[in-house]
Image (cartoon, helix red, strand yellow):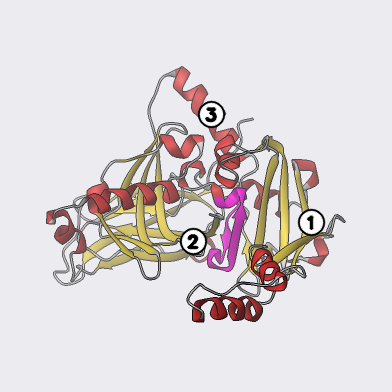
Amino acid sequence: MKQAILLLLSWLIALPLLAQHKIQGRVFDEKTDEPIEFVSVYVNTTTIGATTNAKGEFVLQVPAGRYELIVSYLGYEPIIYQVNTDQLPKSILFKLTPKEHKLTEVVVEGKRDPEWYQNLEVFKQNFLGKSTFGRQCKLLNPEVLAITFDPKTALLEVKSDRPLLIENPALGYKIEYLLTEFKLYMRDGYVVYLGYPKYTLMKGGQAKQRRWSRNRETAYRGSVMHFVRALRQQQLEEQGFNLRRLYRVPNPNRPTDEEIAAIRASAKAAGGSITLDAAATDILARARLPKLIEQLDKNPVPYADYLSFDGDEVKMQFDNYMQVVYTGEKEEMAYVQQLKPFNPPKPSYQTSVISLRSDYVLLDKNGSIYEPLGVLFEGYWGFEKLGDMLPLDYTLPE
């Protein structure tokens, strides 16, 4: 199944190496107006976070920039709050609203059938990933998941009222993931998920720290984060990326859908007793050909053709598709075997395809894309999932 993924992690943050700013506030219950202790307040997709004290107070130290704060507590609706240190109030008051429907409590009490566990494995493969790092990830609380599969539409949908607790022993992170949407369209071959992860560094000795540092660098190089940072700096080639225009055009050798449908309708009407002539046999044989063929323009694409700059804001805008090849690393064998399980070729350079589902997207300094709903990733970036992702405050070791 062709892998594609919409990166739906709602990232909006900038972390330049400047003086620290203090974000402080309080969290109260909207109905009782009482402070809530142990509420998780964190910067989306980073290791920056805190919990409230008995008075509902919290303090975060962050570099200058724009942030997306996540305020999350069990039994309450989460709050997603945009903040800019240039316009930072002295204190922020959050009032959490109790959830009306406790989906997870109902699901946990229910009896699970074998199909649920099968769907759980499908979810983990398409959420945590099938890569070397993804396979090592552990979902510690799968019981909080509400999993449904519609055989008519081949749609697998997963929800949870509680954060998912994940350990990534390969990269040395504990992840608390607030999942808001997961949909796997099996028939079309792509997955959509949206959530807000909080990263915490795992503790370990020097040997583990060295291994985690090496693995994090491996995960970073060639990643979407690496690509976006290099693109903002207009240093794709220098950092190992090749970007080319890709066109997908109708396959002239494939019969039209009308021709194929006509032959199949005739055969069905005859009850299978019809003898197909050479022309009809040829049409059915060529029906297995792909509808589209790809044409790659091997000429480099000037940055000005798809990037525009307005101060610190970088906008990416283009039509059709872009192929991105990272020459610094080869594909994992698991990816190659997924594409061609019976006769897999030797791994080549990591190749991905990007296209826009909105007019444009913005590229942030940290390597995130806003709006992430506006980008579709295929190929190798579609293969990599949560198990290969790093927090946005990650930087390469000096």
Q: Give the labeled residue for mark 1.
A: 244
Say which label, 1 or 3, has the lower sequence index.
3
Q: Give the labeled residue for mark 2.
A: 8
Reply yes or no: does residue 261 show up in magenta: no
Q: Are marks 1 and 3 in contact (CB under 8 Å)?
A: no
Q: Residue 334: give x, y in percent of width and height.
A: 54, 38
Say which label, 1 or 2, has the lower sequence index.
2
Q: Is residue 316 visible?
A: no
Q: Residue 283: give x, y in percent of width and height.
A: 68, 70
Q: Magenta part of the protein: which range?
A: 367-382
Q: Give the labeled residue for mark 3.
A: 213
Q: Amino acid at mark 3?
A: Ser
Provide the secondary structure element on which disc 3 rests: helix
**Image side of residue 138 versus residue 207, left or right:** left
Reply yes or no: does residue 376 show up in magenta: yes
Q: Residue at x 31, y 49 (%)?
A: 118
Q: Amino acid at mark 1?
A: Arg
